[in-house]
């Protein structure tokens, strides 16, 4: 019986083989969900801001000077380096807080370093500040793009109505159409306004940052019980010192000494609207050999005359090219002479 069944099974299998060969070799893959197929975007990684040049300069100064000359002052938002030298006398006359100009550090060889080293021999403590980078060197926030207004109808498919004027083509346009400048788009106006707003906020924040550092220096001087506190500003440092005293007079500050003062780019008001209007004594040192500097000094002098500012005193210096030591000695003598005036 089994001998007959076995050949029969073989025949049946051979007969079904073509049908089996037509079937797919593998099952159909499962449907892919569209949501699963989309790759999840990688989370944007915020790069840390690069250190400011002033921070790098301060780090280099920390390696260069003894700990006894370094003071870490604090504002509500940050710490910064100041270089300190005590007066070399038993009864100091006071403290001179030196504000360097843009792109200069607390021991810059021009103006800052000679005065900070020599003033202690004249009976004054000196405190030279590290100031933030100029605003022009700092990254500003970019305005967000303004979204276009939603269109209710496709311009290409909309049918013209009876009130719609015919489209102007090159053939039907008048000859002077191409000369008419297109009106600014509302989106462009909004972007410009947003950019200006961000710029104004950045300038205000920069000014507050400057004022906070001067505040910290004045607090330090008061803690040292300095009899008098003088702000000495070089270049843009003179502008910030004058504006600081104009907007928020600090207790204990008894005078302002300017050396070649300049207004930082983009800021206002002009120095002739600041320095001569202060109620405390102001010394103004400038180099008469520089045409732009001489012209700016003349505007400040004329403003002081109009205001009858008896506390404003201006002194011209002479540039000595090729003789840096003599030029800096001249500056020191003029600064010391103003500090020793009876009105100080």
Image (cartoon, rainbow, N blue to C red):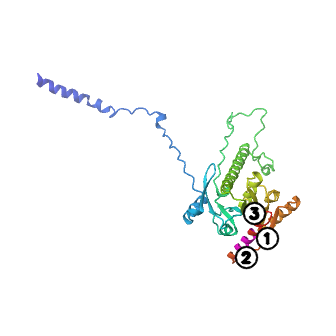
Q: Are marks 3 and 1 in contact (CB under 8 Å)?
A: no
**What whole-number distance in Å separates the C-alpha atoms at marks 3 and 2?**
21 Å
As drawn, 112 above or below 80: below
State which quarter of the image contains the N terminus.
top left
> Which label belongs to residue 320?
2
**What whole-number distance in Å separates the C-alpha atoms at marks 1 and 2?**
13 Å
User: Which one is in front in this view, the residue at disc 3 or the one at disc 1?
Assistant: 3
Q: Is residue 256 left or right of residue 63?
A: right
Q: Quadrant of residue 101?
A: bottom right
Q: Residue at x 40, y 32 (%)?
A: 30
> Which label belongs to residue 125?
none
Q: Is residue 198 left or right of residue 31?
A: right
Residue neighbourhood size for the residue with mark 3, other residues' Cα within 10 Å, grouped as few (<14), some (14–19), many (≥20): many
Q: Residue at x 78, y 55 (%)?
A: 269
Let me know if residue 161 is in the magenta part. no
Between 188 and 232, which is closer to the camera in this rendering?
Answer: 232
* Mark 3, residue position: 257
The spot of residue 200 in percent (x, y) is: 72, 49
* Mark 1, residue position: 316
**Which region of the structure is painted magenta?**
326-335
Residue neighbourhood size for the residue with mark 1, other residues' Cα within 10 Å, grouped as few (<14), some (14–19), many (≥20): some
**What whole-number distance in Å separates the C-alpha atoms at marks 3 and 1?**
13 Å
The spot of residue 225 in percent (x, y) is: 68, 57
The spot of residue 171 in percent (x, y) is: 76, 47
Between 46 and 330, which is closer to the camera in this rendering?
Answer: 330
Q: Residue at x 67, y 42 (%)?
A: 146
């Amino acid at each position: 019986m089994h001998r007959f069944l076995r050949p029969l099974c073989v025949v049946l299998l051979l007969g079904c083989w073509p049908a089996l060969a037509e079937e797919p070799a593998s099952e159909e893959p499962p449907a892919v969900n569209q949501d699963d197929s989309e790759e999840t975007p990688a989370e944007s990684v915020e790069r840390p801001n690069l250190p400011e040049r002033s921070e790098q300069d301060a780090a280099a100064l920390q390696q260069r000077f003894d700990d006894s000359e370094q003071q870490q002052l604090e504002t509500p938002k940050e710490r910064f380096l100041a270089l300190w030298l005590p007066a070399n006398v038993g009864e100091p006359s006071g403290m001179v807080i030196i504000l360097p100009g843009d792109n200069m550090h607390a021991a810059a060889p021009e103006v800052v370093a000679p005065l900070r080293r020599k003033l202690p021999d004249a009976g004054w403590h000196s405190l030279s500040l590290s100031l933030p980078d100029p605003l022009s060197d700092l990254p500003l926030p970019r305005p967000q793009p303004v979204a276009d207004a939603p269109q209710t109808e496709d311009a290409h498919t909309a049918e013209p109505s009876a009130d719609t004027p015919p489209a102007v083509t090159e053939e039907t346009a008048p000859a002077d159409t191409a000369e008419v400048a297109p009106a600014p788009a509302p989106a462009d106006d909004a972007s410009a306004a947003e950019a200006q707003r961000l710029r104004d906020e950045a300038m205000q924040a920069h000014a507050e940052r400057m004022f906070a550092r001067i505040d910290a220096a004045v607090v330090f001087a008061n803690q040292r019980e300095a009899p008098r506190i003088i702000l000495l500003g070089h270049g843009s440092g003179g502008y910030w010192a004058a504006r600081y005293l104009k907007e928020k007079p600090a207790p204990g500050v008894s005078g302002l000494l300017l050396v070649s003062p300049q207004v930082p780019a983009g800021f206002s008001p002009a120095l002739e609207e600041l320095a001569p209007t202060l109620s405390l004594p102001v010394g103004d040192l400038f180099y008469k050999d520089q045409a732009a500097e001489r012209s700016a000094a003349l505007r400040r002098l004329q403003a002081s005359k109009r205001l009858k500012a008896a506390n404003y005193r201006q002194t011209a210096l002479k540039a000595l090219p090729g003789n840096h030591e003599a030029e800096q000695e001249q500056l020191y003598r003029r600064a010391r002479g103003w500090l020793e005036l009876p009105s100080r």
